[in-house]
């Protein structure tokens, strides 16, 4: 079974593509798909060698000529086990294709992922439990697991099961465009950010106002938080409540982020005001080393609290401001992941930040004249 961090595969099933089979094949090849599955060797003939040509024969009899197929996926109960077929047809890779609709089907799938070099699975019922069991059965094995998905949206769900997912997903497209959307979902990566060291220049009381605590659906790490700033061109890394303090328990899912008008990053490109975040949306979790991941927002708590204003400056001269709740349990990160209580910050202290470099309009980066002060 492929390791969790390995790049996932995109497979396209054109067995029922009909009149637009050629168009979706060309789209998949352009998108760098790993494999295209067809029932007829003739449908694989025009495909380039840059994509694996996978034959899934229809009926109980295997063809006498596999054409230019690289891989053949069979039903072991009908066609025989892949190992036996591979011995009869040197040069071809054989794998299993199975439908999981009951206990017997699940048992067959678990046996296949431990035995065969490739297993293509389709799950009938709207539950992830059978997939979890199959992935657990495959732990430590070398075979490849591909699961069929009903739509592009389901791909993200499959790939997150047990924090690892299968090695790839197989989609029968509803039409042109689906291959591109699948590639976007499967190959999405949240890029690292180049964090900078900022020097604190002033810390002052800022009266009273509403601040937002962002409660995520994720255990945040001890050097991880979200970027927050009063201006879109500069933000400070506010750390999660993973570090103990007296009087209250840790809340490792939470970032006490800042005043409600503050900017944060919903993903590596788009900003949101803290007041705009809501349950089911996303916010970008950022580590002290610049690594990022999108996490789901479970709740945003907005309450009136005393506020503290922190001014800082980058080496480039860019000015940054952060307004947070005035309390020592509200913390930011310094170089090396040092945890700093915001109420103890003093001019000359160093904090970690990020300079997006462009102005924003409704969250999108834009080049235009805009002063923020």
Image: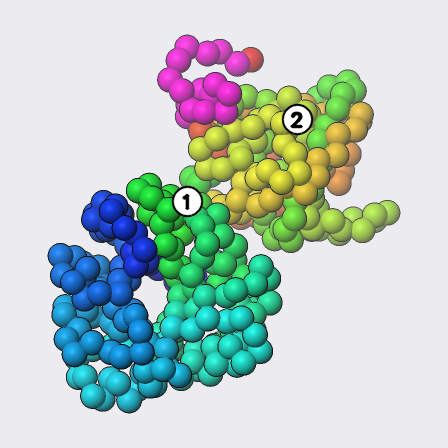
- Determine whether the residue tagged by mark 1 lies in a helix, strand or loop: loop
Quote the CA–CA distance across marks 1 and 2. Answer: 25 Å
The residue sitting at the right extreme is 247
Q: Which mark is residue 275?
A: 2
Identify residue for label 1.
Answer: 191
> Where on the picture, by quarter, is residue 180?
top left
Q: Residues within 10 Å of mark 2 (few under 14, many from 20)?
A: some
> Where on the picture, by quarter, is residue 142?
bottom left
- Determine whether the residue tagged by mark 2 lies in a helix, strand or loop: helix
Highlighted range, magenta: 357-372
Above or below for 148 versus 104: above
Above or below for 232 versus 33: above
Is most of the magenta stretch helix, strand or loop? Answer: loop
Q: Position of residue 19 (x, y in %)?
A: 24, 47
Q: Can residue 372 be spotted in the picture?
A: yes
Q: Position of residue 266 (x, y in %)?
A: 53, 35
Q: Does the magenta run of residues contain 270? A: no
Q: Please give the name of the residue rendered at 31% of the width and 74% of the height, measured from the top-left corner.
A: 59
Q: Position of residue 216 (x, y in %)?
A: 65, 44
Judged by depth in the image, the label closer to the viewer, 1 or 2, is 2
Left of 74 or right of it: where is 238? right
- Residues 28 and 358: in front is 28
Q: Are marks 1 and 2 in contact (CB under 8 Å)?
A: no
- Residues 298 and 204: in front is 298
Question: Which image quarter holds the C terminus?
Answer: top right
Q: Please give the name of the residue rendered at 48% of the width and 30% of the height, measured from the top-left corner.
A: 270
- Residues 264 and 54: in front is 54
Left of 68 or right of it: where is 340? right
């Amino acid at each position: 079974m492929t390791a969790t961090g390995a790049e996932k595969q995109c497979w396209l099933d054109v067995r029922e593509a009909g009149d637009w089979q050629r168009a979706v094949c060309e789209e998949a090849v352009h998108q760098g798909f790993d494999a295209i599955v067809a029932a007829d060797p003739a449908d694989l003939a025009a495909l380039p060698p840059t994509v694996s040509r996978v034959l899934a024969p229809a009926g109980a009899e295997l063809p006498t000529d596999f054409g230019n197929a690289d891989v053949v996926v069979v039903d072991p109960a009908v066609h025989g086990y892949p190992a036996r077929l591979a011995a009869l047809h040197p040069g071809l890779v054989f794998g299993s294709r199975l439908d999981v609709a009951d206990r017997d089907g699940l048992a067959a799938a678990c046996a296949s992922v431990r035995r065969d070099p490739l297993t293509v699975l389709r799950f009938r019922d709207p539950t992830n439990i059978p997939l979890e069991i199959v992935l657990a059965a495959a732990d430590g094995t070398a075979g490849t697991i591909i699961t069929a998905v009903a739509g592009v949206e389901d791909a993200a769900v499959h790939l997150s099961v047990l924090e690892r997912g299968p090695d790839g997903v197989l989609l029968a497209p509803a039409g042109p465009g689906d291959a591109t959307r699948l590639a976007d979902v499967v190959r999405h990566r949240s890029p690292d950010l180049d964090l900078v060291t900022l020097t604190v220049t002033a810390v002052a009381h800022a009266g009273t106002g509403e601040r937002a605590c962002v409660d995520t659906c994720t255990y945040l790490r001890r050097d991880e938080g979200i970027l927050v700033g009063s201006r879109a061109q500069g933000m400070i890394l506010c750390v999660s409540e993973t570090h103990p303090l007296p009087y209250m328990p840790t809340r490792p899912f939470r970032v006490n982020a800042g005043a409600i008008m503050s900017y944060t990053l919903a993903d590596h490109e788009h900003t949101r005001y803290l007041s705009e975040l809501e349950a089911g949306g996303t916010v970008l979790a950022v580590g002290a080393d610049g690594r990022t991941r999108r996490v789901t927002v479970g709740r945003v708590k907005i309450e009136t609290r005393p506020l503290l204003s922190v001014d800082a400056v980058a080496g480039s001269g860019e000015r940054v401001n952060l307004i947070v709740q005035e309390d020592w349990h509200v913390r930011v990160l310094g170089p090396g992941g040092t945890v700093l209580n915001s109420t103890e910050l003093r001019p000359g202290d160093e904090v970690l930040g990020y300079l997006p470099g462009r102005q924003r309009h409704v969250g999108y980066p834009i080049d235009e004249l805009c002063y923020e002060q």
